[in-house]
């Protein structure tokens, strides 16, 4: 197993995992027709652009010769919090859930952001995604009272901010 900085050539694997994880993790939270409409090809184009043009740090975890998860983060996007970093997204292929890969990715990026000088970390999680909240809770993140409403597909959902 190895964690490394993602390359533009990793976009197809990142996109595949992104779509599969959304379709599994958000089943029952987001509309089924929206989840089924997610396109790996469209996500691949988005990830190629992110990996070549964005200031975010994206890392992949390889296991058994294949990418099984990824994490992306950087400066807190609201910019109102000084010295705050943010975990933008973390997804593991659902076939590899509950094997410790997510925790390893999270710790790897948290350590990297700390080395960059960020003194606290934030992330946003869907209020109805109790599994993800439990995952982040185990890593020391706690709800801090901040919430936002976000439209995903035709549904408006509540996201809560977790911090550590």
Image (cartoon, helix red, strand yellow):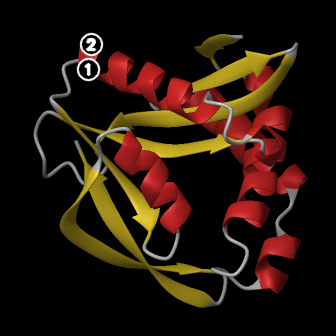
Quarter of the view holding residue 78: bottom left
Residue 57 makes an appearance in the image:
no
Q: Where is residue 2 in the image (x, y as percent from the top left)?
A: 67, 9
What is the spatial separation of the Cα atoms under label 1 and label 2, in whole angstroms? Answer: 4 Å
**Does residue 144 sit above or below 104 in this rendering?**
below
**Mark 2 burial class by Cα count in 10 Å: few <14, some 14-19, many 20+:** few
Q: Is residue 57 left or right of residue 85?
A: right
Quarter of the view holding residue 107: top left
Count of numbered labels shown in the rendering: 2
Q: Position of residue 95 (x, y in %)?
A: 84, 43
Residue drawn 15% across the image and 29% down it: 119
**Does residue 118 sit above or below 78 in this rendering?**
above
Q: Which mark is residue 156?
A: none
Quarter of the view holding residue 147: bottom left
Q: Name the residue under label 1.
A: 114
**Mark 1 burial class by Cα count in 10 Å: few <14, some 14-19, many 20+:** some
Q: Position of residue 96 (x, y in %)?
A: 77, 37
Q: In this view, does 20 lie to the left or right of 57?
A: right
**Does residue 156 sit above or below 131 in this rendering?**
below
Given residues 65 and 153, the one toward you in this image is: 65
SS label for mark 1: helix
Q: Position of residue 31 (x, y in %)?
A: 73, 85
SS label for mark 2: helix
Q: In this view, does 87 lie to the left or right of 91?
A: left
Q: Name the residue under label 2.
A: 115
Residue drawn 59% across the image and 15% down it: 5
Residue 132 makes an appearance in the image:
yes
Residue drawn 71% across the image and 11% down it: 1
Residue drawn 45% across the image and 55% down it: 134
Labels 1 and 2 touching (C-beta < 8 A): yes
**Quarter of the figure with the C terminus:** top left
């Amino acid at each position: 197993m190895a964690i490394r900085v993602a390359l533009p050539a990793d976009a197809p694997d990142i996109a595949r995992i992104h779509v599969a994880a959304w379709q599994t993790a958000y089943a029952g939270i987001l509309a089924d027709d929206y989840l089924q409409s997610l396109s790996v090809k469209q996500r691949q184009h988005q990830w190629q652009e992110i990996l070549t043009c964005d200031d975010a740090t994206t890392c992949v975890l390889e296991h058994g010769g294949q990418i099984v998860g990824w994490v992306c983060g950087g400066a807190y996007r609201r910019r109102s919090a000084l010295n705050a970093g943010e975990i933008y997204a973390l997804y593991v292929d659902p076939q590899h859930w509950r094997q410790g890969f997510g925790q390893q990715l999270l710790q790897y990026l948290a350590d990297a952001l700390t080395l960059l000088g960020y003194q606290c970390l934030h992330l946003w999680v869907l209020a109805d995604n109790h599994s993800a909240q439990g995952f982040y809770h185990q890593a020391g993140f706690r709800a801090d009272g901040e919430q936002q409403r976000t439209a995903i597909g035709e549904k408006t959902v509540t996201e809560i901010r977790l911090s550590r």
